[in-house]
Amino acid sequence: MSTSKMTISNSNISDRYFSNSNMTRLRKVMSVISIVLFMSSVMLVAVKGFNWGLDFTGGVVAEVQLSDQVTKDALKTKLDTAFQQDVQVVGMAEQDRWTIRYSQLTDAPQPNLVDALSSVSDQVKVLNSSVVGPQVGQDMVDQGGLAVLVCFLMIMLYLSVRFEWRLALGALAAIIYDVTLILGLFAFTQFEFNLTVLAAVLAILGYSLNDSIIIADRVREMLRGNPNGDTDNLLNESVKATFSRTMVTSGTTLITVSALWLLGGAALQGFAIALVVGIVSGTWSSVSVGITLPKLLGLQPCHYQVKAPVEVEGEYP
């Protein structure tokens, strides 16, 4: 008897907190938050830019130890003047240590790094210095951009054939949102953007698409099976039906990537951070963007109903 009462009580609590009205309200709040995060990420990328790794820029990278009184602004101003370029200055965990990156100009002689630093610090010690050539040339960047564009177009074509253009556009918008959020994070934190981070961004394209397809497939089934149903209610039921599956998939993947983040060392830190953010964002955007945008575009159950063939009256032999 007590077990039956407990089951009824749990069911009532579930119906109360996961009712269609609450789910619709929650999706709208998530969508507003997503818009704010997306616009913030775009502004961060446009204003701050990236801390490009030498994989993209090439040049000289040096780790130096200076006096504690040296500030980043004073150091950067002096180095920009000395080397006649925008020198990248990044503070390290220790207060007196800095990472300095600059390109090697071939059309003009460049000063010695120690001489340039001596004017801002009475203590100069070069801990490490190396010259790195760019691994990603302009041709590779252009070809990579073209490949990403073709990838987006092929994904859009496949999803349009399988689902319908509204759901396809929602899935594509979710992918763009996830990638933009990762780029905004790296612009905000100024973590080094190197080839491993680029590989993580490309991996997130596929992972985000997987989350969106899972929910979109369920939405398609719900719309086909309920031709007279309310679209918001059907979308909410689709989210609830796929919630446990999505959380299990994302959770197990996060455990693996978190282990990589904690144990992989500094070389894989950027790669792991991008994957963690992309996995969480992919799960979030599949609801806040992937199915909310199609609803705003007028998605209805009638779009997935098979029309019966029209019989034409006439004479038959």
Image (cartoon, rainbow, N blue to C red):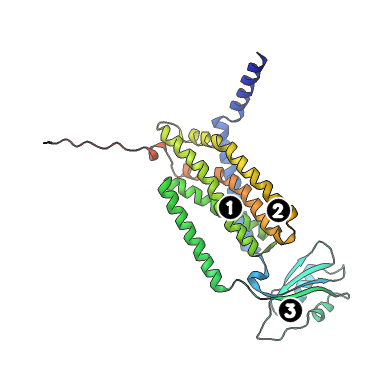
| Residue 182 % position (x, y) | 63, 55
What residue lies at 79% left-to-right and 64% top-to-bottom? Answer: 92
Seen in the picture, residue 136 relative to 274 is either above or below; the reply is below
What residue lies at 52% left-to-right and 41% top-to-bottom? Answer: 215
| Residue 167 % position (x, y) | 46, 45
Instruction: Kindly state the secondary structure of the residue where label 2 is placed.
Output: helix
Instruction: Kindly state the secondary structure of the residue where label 3 is placed.
Output: helix
Q: CA distance from mark 3 to mark 2?
A: 41 Å
- The amino acid sitting under disc 1 is Asp
Which of pointers 3 and 2 lies earlier in the amino acid sequence? 3
Mark 1 packing: few (<14 Cα in 10 Å), some, or many (20+)?
Answer: many
Q: Are marks 1 and 3 in contact (CB under 8 Å)?
A: no
Quadrant of the image containing the C terminus: top left
Instruction: Kindly state the secondary structure of the residue where label 1 is placed.
Output: helix
Q: Nearer the viewer, residue 60 or 3?
A: 3
- Indicate left or right for 170 with 9 as reference: left
Q: CA distance from mark 1 to mark 3?
A: 38 Å
Q: Nearer the viewer, residue 84 or 102?
A: 102
The answer to which image quadrant residue 112 occupies is bottom right
Quadrant of the image containing the N terminus: top right
Give the residue number, with chain letter if any, for mark 2.
260
Give the residue number, with chain letter if any, for mark 3.
81
Can you name the residue that lies furthest to the top here? 1
Mark 3 packing: few (<14 Cα in 10 Å), some, or many (20+)?
Answer: few
